Amino acid sequence: MMVALAQRPCIPCRGGMDPLTREQCAPYFAEVPNWQMDATGRRISRRFLFPDYRSALAFVNAVSALAEETWHHPELILGWGFCEVSLTTRKIGGLHESDFVMAARIDALAETPLDTAWLPPLPPPRCTSRSEAANARTVPG
């Protein structure tokens, strides 16, 4: 029985090997079907949607921690309610099995509720009137 992608080790690529071909990549997409290969065949990406900016930022923080832990760093684009993740192995100029392992682990992060530790703190409430603004600037003496 084959080990699921998310359970496989994410082995850092040291170079000196050829990137995977499109044909070699095809079986991996069975486990990460929401990821897309770019036109060059050298990168996979996926867009994750969230209800707001803060949730997307929490996801980026969690993916960043995973990237540091595995030493496999995706490109991340953050926006209001979304995060776009792209993976490639720069040392070989294309895709390696570790890109698909990382994709499966990122999918697993997205499928479970994120720990609140990944949420950035909320800023203090904004003042809504001139008197509130004046009171906020007053230093107690």
Image (spheres, rainbow, N blue to C red):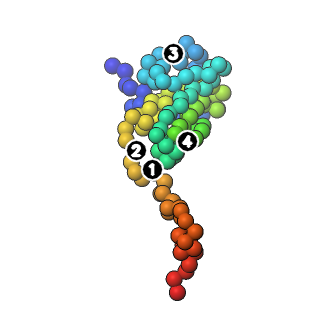
Residue beneath disc 4: 80
Sequence-earlier tag: 3 or 2: 3
Report how many numbered discs are placed on residues in the image: 4
Residue 137 appears left or right of 34: right
Q: Residues within 10 Å of mark 1 (few under 14, many from 20)?
A: some
Sequence-earlier tag: 4 or 2: 4
Residue beneath disc 1: 118
Eye-nearest disc, 4 or 3: 4
| Residue at the extreme top of the image, as rendered | 23
Residue 87 appears left or right of 106: right
Identify the image quadrant of the N terminus. Answer: top left
Residue beneath disc 3: 26
Distance between mark 4 and mark 3 Cα atoms = 32 Å
Distance between mark 3 and mark 2 Cα atoms = 30 Å
What residue do we see at 49% from left, 43% from top? 52
Residue beneath disc 2: 114
Amino acid bearing label 2: Leu
- Helix or strand or loop: what does disc 1 sit on? helix
Eye-nearest disc, 4 or 2: 4
Amino acid bearing label 3: Ala
Residue 13 appears left or right of 51: right
Sequence-earlier tag: 4 or 1: 4
- Helix or strand or loop: what does disc 4 sit on? loop
Distance between mark 3 and mark 1 Cα atoms = 33 Å
Amino acid bearing label 1: Trp
